[in-house]
Image (tube, rainbow, N blue to C red):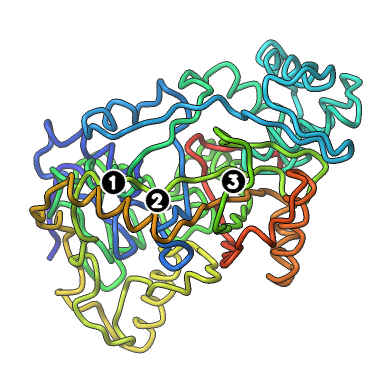
Amino acid sequence: MSESNSVVVVGAGLAGLYAAKLLQPQFKDVLVLEATNRPGGRVRQVAGAAPWPVEAGPQFIHGANSSLKEMLDEMQCGIQQYDWPDWWYFGKERRFMRAPAEDQDLNRTHELFADVGNEKYPETDISAEQWLRNKGASSKVLAIADACYANDFGCTLHQLGLREMITENRKWDSGEDYLVLDCPLSDLVKHIAKDLNRQIHCNCPVSRIEHDSNGALIRLYGGRQIRCKHVLVTVPITVLQREEITFVPPLPQLKQQAIQRVKMSNAIKVIMMFAQPFWPEGFFDVVCTDSFIPEFWVTPPPTYSHQHEKQPDSCRDASQSSASRCGPQAGSSQQAAAQDAGTEARQEHKQNLQQGQTLQPQQQQSWQQPQVQQHDSQQQQHDTQQQQQQEAVYCMVGFVAGSKAEEISKLRQNSVVIKTLSQLDDMFCKSCMWHGTFLVTLLLLLQLVWTQQVALLM
């Protein structure tokens, strides 16, 4: 026997949650199905890398006109706005400069990317690297474009397609500044989800969607079925590319082609903690050309959580038995390989079904907004600041994406640490080893998806 809802949203990442929030006034019974054991998707923190939880996924809001900005204002979240980048490091020249830097090649690179929207869509897509070479770009322009623009897209220059660059230039309207929050991004997830509560069902990976003019039948691993008039699929593009959800009848050919065309590359964050800062006062971010790590930024600890809540327990499995659990268990924060958790859940369900095991009803849990704890926010903020002063730690994050990230992922962690610190030594003309480095955590984030949809060259 199947359940019935007017609208079902598949996927409880930010896209799915925001869609459900917009739909709820008209469709009171909107239901959100999430394959993993928590809402939020790639918004997650890791513990142990610093005295406070560090963002393993997205960390900033891109642009003051972002649709998320209004919700952050509702939360009364403190926001600092930065130009990006505010520093440059030219590796071959060993030159460290504050932006806006007076450099002919740098200005030329910005001009080319600013005007790319005026280009005609090529009949056959070419890479950004080839496009720049066709424009007569120098080797330094190519290096700047790779470290700044391609790395920001989440790839390397030869992977970035000209079609996507043209589309982004014409359509991007959120602004160029970076917004740094005084609270973890998980607070934003809770804020969006607060009115949904039991309408978010975790540990519910979808296996099949049968659809026609009358609506859809959604089948979950474990046998649960849900009928609905409308279904909105917001899962990661890689889930659709791997055909982990079967559509009956198949999606139109144009949609299938679009799904296969959009590519996701890999990214790595190198998180470093120092006992004292060695960078210039007011420093936020630096883009580095011809370097091991193409970008660094400093990340302050959250001042406090605007939600003053514990992490939700109700998304966790009711049963702790490994034979029947649905959601992925937390991995080591010291070296995390963050794979698609929904894929893990689906694979495990397939194994369980092959072994004759099914989902226990109590495991398909609805997410509940945690009970608000009464705190004196000023006292909590004071205690947090006092603790930070006692620990006196400063966090810097290195970021690299695309084929470079894949190459770095093959290195031993000690080698990554040494190469990263050596680069910082060259940049800041100081020995970072002697500034109290006490922890370096390497995070390999597979299938990292940025706030904008990224289309890479086929």
Residue drawn where x is 74% and y is 39% of the image: 288
Vertical order, 367 against 167 (above or below): below
Q: Can you identify the residue that label 1 sits on?
A: 189
Mark 3 secondary-structure assignment: helix
Mark 1 secondary-structure assignment: helix
Q: Can you identify the residue that label 2 sits on?
A: 43
Crowdedness of circle 1 by 10 Å Cα count: few (<14), some, many (20+)? many
Identify the amino acid type marked 2: Val
Tell me if I can see residue 330 in this picture: yes
In terms of sequence position, does the residue under pointer 1 or pointer 3 come before the other? 1
Q: Quadrant of residue 131?
A: top right
Vertical order, 279 against 107 (above or below): below
Going by the image, does 302 lie left or right of 137?
Answer: left
Residue drawn where x is 47% and y is 37% of the image: 451
How far is mark 2 from mark 3, CA to CA?
24 Å
Q: Marks 1 and 3: CB-CB under 8 Å?
A: no
Going by the image, does 65 lie left or right of 386?
Answer: right
Q: Can you identify the residue that label 3 sits on?
A: 260
Going by the image, does 377 lie left or right of 159?
Answer: left
In percent of width and height, residue 444 lies at 59, 62
Vertical order, 40 against 314 (above or below): above
In terms of sequence position, does the residue under pointer 2 or pointer 3 come before the other? 2
Identify the amino acid type marked 3: Gln
In the rendered image, the quadrant that contains the C terminus is top right
Q: Marks 1 and 2: CB-CB under 8 Å?
A: yes
Identify the amino acid type marked 1: Val
In percent of width and height, residue 118 lies at 69, 10
